[in-house]
Image (cartoon, rainbow, N blue to C red):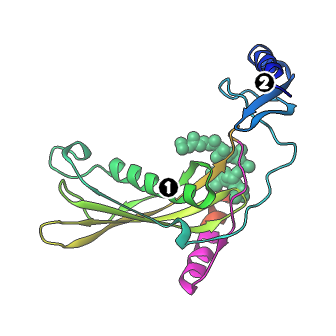
Amino acid sequence: MGPGSGDRRILILSTRLASGYPICVMTLLGYKETGNVTKQNANRAVDIPAEPAATPPGKTVDESRVVMAITMQPPDANSWGNVHGGTIMRLADEAGGAAAIRHSRARCVTVAMDSMVFKEPVYIGDLLTIRACLTYTGRTSMEVEALIEAEDLRTGKVRNAGASHLVYVAIDDLGRPTPVPPLVLQTEEERERWRAAEERRAFRVRSRP
Ligand SMILES: CC(C)(COP(=O)(O)OP(=O)(O)OC[C@H]1O[C@@H](n2cnc3c(N)ncnc32)[C@H](O)[C@@H]1OP(=O)(O)O)[C@@H](O)C(=O)NCCC(=O)NCCS
């Protein structure tokens, strides 16, 4: 198919996308005919595969581990200099999300975040470090453990500021859950974390709204 006919197909796409007409999407190599469109996604041309995506090969915990460190600034804190709990939760979600994306190499959304206890206060000027790693994978979901510590940069004293478990779901271009690589467990500690994650998952399934 030449560029001329491809141009015409793209015009049809822009006017009749909702009615399920056959469409073409441009590829780097030229023009490629695809199946019928059944769903719109922000006016973008999307190719909906007929078959569900296959499960990708497994990946180890180390392949997606994330360490994120940020010095806390005045906008992160209240007027007494204590860093907001919401700031810490957001950073835990960012680090956890990065680990989930690294593992799946897909778009990920947060579907659950366990309750979080702030064990020690964090102050302006502290270096907040989040260590995030995968503990469990389901078919399309991933649980990530986020450990949070705060370092007083002048004294070097490090405090354990808290921890949380977050669940992410990998999604395709249409926002549908898509398979993630299974987690390859290499150490007894990783296997122990997996077993604990299975219990949390069972609890979440029972309490799912
Ligand atoms: C995440 C989302 C796509 C899942 O959609 P869904 O219709 O519930 O999909 P499914 O029932 O097929 O579940 C998909 C996976 O999510 C998991 N899941 C769904 N709800 C969950 C919950 N409340 N807690 C934990 N896991 C959950 C399922 O167990 C399943 O995992 P698995 O494939 O590993 O077994 C949908 O709930 C969503 O878009 N939520 C909003 C996400 C968001 O906007 N987050 C904030 C910004 S990032």
Whether residue 186 is in magenta: the answer is yes
- Residue at the spot of label 1: 98
Q: Nearer the viewer, mark 2 or mark 1?
A: 2
Q: Is residue 175 left or right of residue 50?
A: left
Whether residue 47 is in magenta: the answer is no
| Viewer-nearest residue: 111 or 106 | 106
- Tell me the quarter of the picture where residue 49 sits: top right
For the N terminus, the image quarter is top right
Q: Which kind of residue does numbered mark 2 sit on?
A: Pro
Q: Residue furthest top?
A: 15
| Labels 2 and 1: the sequence-earlier one | 2
| Viewer-nearest residue: 26 or 91 | 26
- Residue at the spot of label 2: 3
Q: Which kind of residue does numbered mark 1 sit on?
A: Ala
| Viewer-nearest residue: 150 or 121 | 150
Give, as a single range, the part of the protein colored magenta.
Answer: 176-199
Q: From where the camera sits, is residue 130 visible? A: yes
Q: Secondary structure at mark 1?
A: helix
Residue 95's spot in the image, x, y percent? Answer: 44, 57
- Tell me the quarter of the picture where residue 131 sits: bottom left
Mark 1 Cα shell of 10 Å, populated few (<14), some (14-19), many (≥20): many
Q: How many marks?
A: 2
Q: From where the camera sits, is residue 208 visible? A: no
Q: Is residue 72 left or right of residue 116?
A: left
